Image (spheres, rainbow, N blue to C red):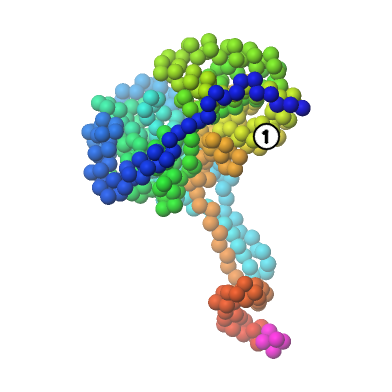
Amino acid sequence: MAVTVLKPAQATEAQAQADTADGVRILLAQVAQGGEAAARDLARRLDGWGGPIVMDEDTVQSAIATVPQSLRDDIAYAHDNIRRFAEAQRATCTDMQTDLRPGLTAGQRYIPLGAAGAYVPGGRYAHIASALMTITTAKVAGVAHVTAASPPRAGQGIPPAILYAMHLAGADHILALGGVQAVAAMTQGLFGARPADIIVGPGNQYVAEAKRQLFGPVGIDMFAGPTDSMVLADASADAKLVAWDLVGQAEHGANSPVWLVTTCASLAQAVMARVPACLAQLPEPNRLAATTAWHDLAEVILCDTAEEMAQVADRTGPEHLHVQAQDLGWWLGRLRAYGSLFLGAETTVAFGDKAAGPNHVLPTSGAARYTGGLSVHKFLKCVTWQQVTAQALPDLARVTANISRTEGMEGHARSADIRLDKFCPMTRLAVTRKG
């Protein structure tokens, strides 16, 4: 058994993390001190936007009117899938209670968060799907108020298609703000927004760092790095499909790694031979980003067995894991570390990115080894409760007091003892006499 790297990565992902952290810390402090005025100033300086920050209903409706009906229909199709999947997830989150012993009842409740902030990336791409994924999921979970923010484009504002997606998904408040200032504004409740209990959504390294620094007083979905994708393929896979699946994910950015792990040497060679032609068909600047990612970060790995392929995947913990191999049931049962799993050649990660239904906000940089992606669960608090009656109180109080005193926590012990005195005096008397 052996694992052979046919194409190693030429460079490691390198970001000036310390510089990013320092820069974000300064920007957050400016908004914390200067409030809305500071956020407006950052919007002018960083996004070239001096227009209104709050998108009122008239502005939203005027923008929606410019979106072609065919695109509206397609966005509605994606929204319907995302909503249906989120509703199915929500149905699995049920309140419960159980009698642990006679007189001792405990339970759990799922309580939606009160307010959420959804960041929708802008920049080179108009991330319509991100608006649907974050806002829809929050509303299905039962979040009362969702503020959505997206970077405005100079002279245009938020692209109309994104505004339509935000509106359709159920955003209660929309801000034309990007970057650190948007995350700070949603956290603090600026521009008429409700202070967010959680900030969700993908973004660049500055957005991710702002979320990381604010975590604690506010919740976040995850600390996300560049997107990544792995294909597991055997001899039955189509080299053309695999090549385009890798190139399509490398298109996210020059720092987005992709991997092909296969048991078929001829497939590996065929994919590597096809990739340059696929890259050449992309428009700029997509071509440069994908070409750099392929050259610097992509790896092609040859294994002897399917089990070895699975082990490579589990060690890596990719954000997206696409199986193009036989016996899909075996793979579904065997694989343990991924953000989202794509089974079979008929599907593609692009389906999940845009319209299939399961959320595309997923753990990156190996975090899939210990966590999953965004779901209705992120917007729900699973809290517990308990109730005790006199039937269970004697034993429960005795055990609690004994453990507490053994630990050296006399106050805990006495808070148990006094309940025997108050609610079960005869039992307390019997225990005292016995002692």
Q: Amino acid at mark 1?
A: Leu
Q: Position of residue 164 (x, y in %)?
A: 36, 30
Q: Is residue 343 left or right of residue 109?
A: right
Residue at 53% over, 20% down = 295
Q: Residues within 10 Å of mark 1 (few under 14, many from 20)?
A: some
Reply yes or no: does residue 192 show up in magenta. no
Q: Which residue extends farthest right?
A: 1
Residues rendered magenta in the picture: 431-435
Up the image or down, 213 lies above or below 230; here it is: below
Q: Quadrant of residue 149?
A: top left
Q: Secondary structure at mark 1?
A: loop
Q: Would residue 433 be counted in the magenta stretch?
A: yes
The reply, left or right, for residue 262 in relation to residue 184 is: right
The reply to whether residue 284 is visible in this rendering is yes
Looking at the picture, tell me which residue is in the foreground, 105 or 266: 266
Q: Quadrant of the C terminus?
A: bottom right
In this rendering, position of residue 276 left or right of residue 33: right
Q: Residue at x 58, y 17 (%)?
A: 243
Which quarter shows the N terminus?
Answer: top right
Q: Is residue 55 above or below residue 143?
A: above
Residue 349 can be seen in this image = no
x then y, percent, for residue 31: 29, 46
Q: Please state the total of marks drawn on the protein image.
A: 1
User: Where is residue 360 drawn, in percent x and y?
Assistant: 51, 33
Along the line of sight, which residue is nearer the eye, 228 or 196? 228
Task: Classify 388 as above or below 381.
Answer: below
Q: Which residue is mark 1?
A: 335
- Magenta-drawn stretch, dominant element (helix, strand or loop): helix
